[in-house]
């Protein structure tokens, strides 16, 4: 293990990298997109893109990181392509901006743990008032950032790896428990049928595009997190099998989230699934009312458990988001790890304040900007989501695979992937990557980027 630290085991790396991918997007965003996309048919298309499109991007990121043994910026310098380190800088910027708003949303979930844990189900009656309470949201977010920073400050094996080995199994156990409970509710089978039985008549261009985008975003690609985590991976480890297991863990948890949420929607709607895509309102408004209807200690335990589950999912992601800029400060600027962690945590918390007050507390940040083709302003948090998460990540992913195949060259990538995997040479996967990495995947990600920018910021639908 180098002086930078490293993962003590393969399972530790897989748990940490899977934890990086697993987050609120799996439990909140995925069911919403499935509901909007027609249910099971969206799930099938999403699974296809996770492995055909996203797995090669993940493999490339990990290989770049392990080959260079450096952070998201230093990796490009170490590989002899300093002119391309802007990809890493874009990734770090993306991660910092994403963590700034992600911590705010995680603070909401943490606040719900406290409120519902004390039996206050009425918090959902005025969700807007809850999020507009800037002081209280600031305190919740502060404690969440504190937990994130403490884990990262303990280093790779003693902090990030140890936390992932605890949080990920606990998250899966809690989700399975919630799935079992939700399946006992009346009309839950209608939700399950919507989720598991595909209707191919629902397939259209929008569903395919949204499934492709959701697959990419759900795996936390394009921001340098997996370059950074890959830099802590030993040469004897099999990158490809590790990437497959990370992808399986991520999609498995997203799938569990659907098994948990859609039976609840069936219960809420009395078996009517026409309006199954309910977005944030489902999590923070509708579900607390269900837990309140259950009543008594059972409602408190189930409700608190659900939002604790959200917090655990968020924490596995916030840890990786913070590690990306911290690794840069440690590697490139020779910062002590603990100082780098607390400095970055403080800066990012402050950067998140406009997102914190842009939910009703500050009129300026609540109605921050109006995009072209729209007459409705969006708040600051939504603006950062659109810029950093929706736009920068597919751009970063496109640039990473272009770099891996055209600049670093496919032969160097192949040599790195063969380390710890002697069966890679001549394999079917090697042949697929030879075609997909230089052409297919950069084109797909460029399309996601362009269409997202045009539709989001200019109101131009293609």
Image (tube, helix red, strand yellow):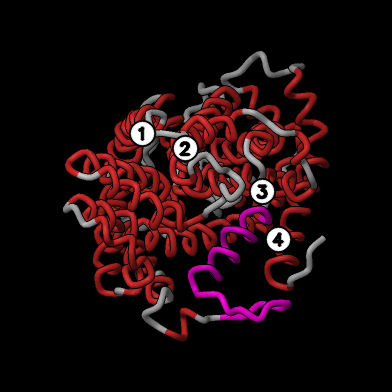
Q: Could you tell me how far apart the alpha carbons at marks 1 and 3 are, in whole angstroms?
A: 27 Å
Q: Which residue lies under the disc numbered 1?
A: 178
The quadrant the N terminus occupies is: top left
Q: Which residue lies under the disc numbered 3?
A: 213
The quadrant the C terminus occupies is: bottom right
Mark earlier in primary sequence (4, 3): 3
In this rendering, the answer to whether 308 lies above or below 44 is below
Closer-to-camera residue (180/369) = 180
Q: Are the residues flagged by discs 4 and 1 in contact, CB closer than 8 Å? A: no
Q: Position of residue 332 (x, y in %)?
A: 46, 56
Q: State which region is magenta.
A: 369-395
Q: Which residue lies under the disc numbered 4?
A: 452
> Which element is circle 3 on?
helix
Q: Could you tell me how far apart the alpha carbons at marks 4 and 3 are, in whole angstroms?
A: 9 Å
> Which element is circle 1 on?
helix
Horizontally, residue 56 falls left or right of residue 194, namely right
Q: Position of residue 30 (x, y in %)?
A: 54, 44
Q: Position of residue 367 (x, y in %)?
A: 51, 81
């Amino acid at each position: 293990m180098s002086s930078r630290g490293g993962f003590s085991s393969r399972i530790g790396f897989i748990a940490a990298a899977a934890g990086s991918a697993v987050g609120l997007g799996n439990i909140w965003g995925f069911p919403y997109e499935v509901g909007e996309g027609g249910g099971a048919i969206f799930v099938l298309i999403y699974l296809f893109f996770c492995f055909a499109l996203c797995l090669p991007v993940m493999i490339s990121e990990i290989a770049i990181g392990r080959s260079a043994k450096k952070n998201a910026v230093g990796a490009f310098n170490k590989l002899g392509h300093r002119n391309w380190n802007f990809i890493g800088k874009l990734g770090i910027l993306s991660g910092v901006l994403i963590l700034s708003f992600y911590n705010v949303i995680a603070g909401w979930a943490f606040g719900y743990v406290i409120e519902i844990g004390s039996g206050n189900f009425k918090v959902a009656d005025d969700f807007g008032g809850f999020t507009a309470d800037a002081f209280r949201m600031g305190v919740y977010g502060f404690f969440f950032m504190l937990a994130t920073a403490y884990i990262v400050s303990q280093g790779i094996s003693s902090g990030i790896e140890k936390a992932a080995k605890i949080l990920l199994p606990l998250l899966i156990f809690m989700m399975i428990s919630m799935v079992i409970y939700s399946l006992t509710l009346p009309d839950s089978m209608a939700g399950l049928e919507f989720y598991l039985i595909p209707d191919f008549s629902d397939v259209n261009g929008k569903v395919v595009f949204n499934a492709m985008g959701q697959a990419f975003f759900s795996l936390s690609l394009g921001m340098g997190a997996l370059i950074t985590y890959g830099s802590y991976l030993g040469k004897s480890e099999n990158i490809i099998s590790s990437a497959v297991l990370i992808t399986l863990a991520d999609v498995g948890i997203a799938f569990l989230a659907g098994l948990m949420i859609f039976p609840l929607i069936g219960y809420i709607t009395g078996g009517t699934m026409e309006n199954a895509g309910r977005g944030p309102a489902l999590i923070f408004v509708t579900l607390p009312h269900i837990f309140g209807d259950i009543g008594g200690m059972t409602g408190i335990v189930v409700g608190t458990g659900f939002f604790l589950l959200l917090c655990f999912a968020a924490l596995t992601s916030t840890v990786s988001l913070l590690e990306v800029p911290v690794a840069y400060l440690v590697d490139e600027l020779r910062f002590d790890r603990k100082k780098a962690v607390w400095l970055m945590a403080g800066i990012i918390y402050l950067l998140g304040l406009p997102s914190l007050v842009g939910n009703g507390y500050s009129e300026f940040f609540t109605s921050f900007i109006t995009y072209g083709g729209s007459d409705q302003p969006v708040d600051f948090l939504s603006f950062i989501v659109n810029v950093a998460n929706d736009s920068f990540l597919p751009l970063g992913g496109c640039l990473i695979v272009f770099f891996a195949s055209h600049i670093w060259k496919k032969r160097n990538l192949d040599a790195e992937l063969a380390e710890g995997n002697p069966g890679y040479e001549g394999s079917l996967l090697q042949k697929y990557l030879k075609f997909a990495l230089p052409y297919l995947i950069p084109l797909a990600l460029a399309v996601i980027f362009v269409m997202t920018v045009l539709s989001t910021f200019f109101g131009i639908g293609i």
